[in-house]
Amino acid sequence: KQEVTQIPAALSVPEGENLVLNCSFTDSAIYNLQWFRQDPGKGLTSLLLIQSSQREQTSGRLNASLDKSSGRSTLYIAASQPGDSATYLCAVAGNTPLVFGKGTRLSVIA
Amino acid sequence: GAVVSQHPSWVICKSGTSVKIECRSLDFQATTMFWYRQFPKQSLMLMATSNEGSKATYEQGVEKDKFLINHASLTLSTLTVTSAHPEDSSFYICSARVAGVWNIQYFGAGTRLSVL
């Protein structure tokens, strides 16, 4: 059964800092991995989707990498801003519906 | 494209009543839809998978008689929480797969259920 773990559970950084969020998964037989953003009490916003054949995806200040063989992904956020404060969820798609990690709660302090 | 609409966004009900949540794919056909539940500060946990025209498949520990799922058309799935209790208060999110594109899910905005 696929399990997804995200570290750290919470992170607080000053504005302008670059940061890395980590995601690991137990079953490397995945088709893709997605990073989502969730604001308090809100739904999910898809940030980046990496297909299993890809190594990374970039969107603006966000860069996600995928190492399928080791079961790891990272989300790199450059020059963080207070508006980046949210919970970031990692989810993997395999032969089952998306399996989510518990998320990393990010606070960017102005 | 690939928009999923979920309604209502927020509902408050009395204990013992039933609540229906709708999930619609607005611009595509969704042969498969999923229902997730999220408790505060927890991750999304899959409750059930519904396929159009057939019975839903429930995850272990989810009461099928309590959480009734109907997927009568290619664009609509409903989740009915029957005889709701305060412990059913949670954030419910649906997602849908585009027919033929089976490894990508699109998500609704979620429904916050508060049972008094």
Image (cartoon, grey):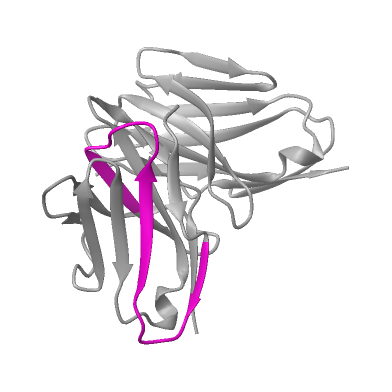
Q: Can you tell which quarter of the image residue B104 is in? A: top left
Q: Can you tell which quarter of the image residue B59 is in? A: bottom left
**Residue at (31, 82) in percent of width and height:** B83
Does B33 lie within the magenta span?
yes
Q: Residue B63: x percent and y percent?
A: 22, 70
Does B77 lie within the magenta span?
no
Q: Is residue A19 left or right of residue B42?
A: right
Q: Is residue B107 left or right of residue A37?
A: left
Looking at this view, is A8 or B106 the one in front? Answer: B106
Q: Is residue A75 left or right of residue B22?
A: right
Q: Is residue B62 visible?
A: no
In this rendering, the answer to whether A98 lies above or below A10 is: above
**Residue at (84, 30) in percent of width and height:** A16
**Residue at (50, 42) in percent of width and height:** A6
Give the residues drawn in magenta, as a range. B10-35
Looking at this view, is B69 or A79 the one in front? Answer: B69
Q: Residue A15: x percent and y percent?
A: 84, 36
Q: Is residue B8 visible?
A: yes
Q: Is residue A4 left or right of residue B63?
A: right
Give the residue at the far left of this rendering: B54
**Residue at (45, 31) in percent of width and height:** A34
Q: Residue B50: x percent and y percent?
A: 21, 49
* Quarter of the figure that contains the N terminus of chain B: top left
Number of labels in the image equals 0
